Image (spheres, rainbow, N blue to C red):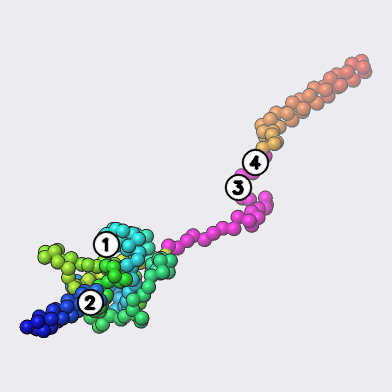
Amino acid sequence: MKKMILLLGLILGICNMGVTAFAEEGKVEVQVNTQKIDGSRYEGTEALVLDIYDLTEWRVKRASDEKTDKEYILNKYPTKEKLASFVQNEQLKKVNQTAIPVDEAGRVALNLPRYQAERDAAYLILASGETKNYQMLPVIIYLPQIDIETKEEVSEWVIYCKYGEISPTPIEPPTIDSSEPPITIPSDSWQGTKTYPDKVLPATNTLIQNYCLLGGSLLAIGFIGLFKKQGGKE
């Protein structure tokens, strides 16, 4: 009887250890859908590949919630270049060894560790391979995920990705080199009205009046001289 009790205790202990080990090393299954809810796709997103990064350490430092941190990343790192800098600066560890392609339907199933370093895991999923004007927005996952209705942790769920439209690069106006000497236009080529700011030209009517007075004076002098000559003869 004692041997049976010991055997049952040993079996229960082993089972309990197995359950604990499964909880610590368990995985969650996430199905990522890169197409729209209606099944259609944005043009240029047919051949996406995904990379997954461990965001757990960054999550711990932030000490915030999933929604707030997701908005922070989307607003602060809106382009792929800035997201790449974020991954590099934060030294995020890549979970997958090679890029994960989506299937023909635009889906991929991911098995992610429930914990990282014995802490609730967090992941950042980035896409590449877009060829047109739309790019997939980053996916942020904080574990555990809780069912809204049952309030229990779920081990598998579906994510529909969102996209942002790439703004066209603005065309900058041509620059003018101000160091070049200004262009001077020769005075002979100017067809407009010329002005003489430092000179005053006499009017035409004034010239005619002056000539008339001069002629009258000469005529009077001539008459006077003629009268004197005649008087001398008498």
Q: Nearer the viewer, residue 231 or 180?
A: 180
User: Which residue appears at 37% of the width and 73% of the height?
Assistant: 93
User: Percent from the top left, x then y, of residue 203?
Assistant: 67, 33
Whole-number angstrom distance, CA of label 3 to CA of label 4: 10 Å
Report, in whole angstroms, how far the alpha carbon at label 2 lies from the one at label 3.
Answer: 96 Å
In the picture, the disc for residue 192 is 3
User: In terms of depth relative to the viewer, which is nearer, 46 or 82?
Assistant: 82
| Eye-nearest disc, 4 or 2 | 2
Rendered location of residue 69, percent (x, y): 30, 60
Element type at mark 4: loop
Q: Taking 183 as reference, is 68 left or right?
A: left
Instruction: State whether residue 71 is above or below residue 46.
Output: above
Residue 177 magenta-highlighted: yes
The earlier-in-sequence mark between 2 and 3 is: 2
What numbered label is drawn on residue 66? 1
Mark 1 or mark 2: name the one nearer the start of the chain. 2
Q: CA distance from mark 1 to mark 3?
A: 73 Å
Q: On the rendered structure, is 158 left or right of 87?
A: left
- Which is closer to the viewer, label 2 or label 3? 2
Asked whether the beta carbons under mark 1 and mark 3 sit within 8 Å of each other, the answer is no
In the rendered view, would you say 144 is above or below 99? Answer: above
Amino acid type for the residue under numbered disc 3? Gly
Residue 92 is one of the magenta-drawn residues = no
- How many neighbours does mark 3 have within 10 angstroms: few (below 14), some (14-19), or many (20 or more)? few
Q: Circle 2 is placed at which residue position?
A: 21
Range of magenta residues: 170-196
In the image, what residue type sits under mark 1? Glu
Please identify the quadrant where the C terminus is shown: top right
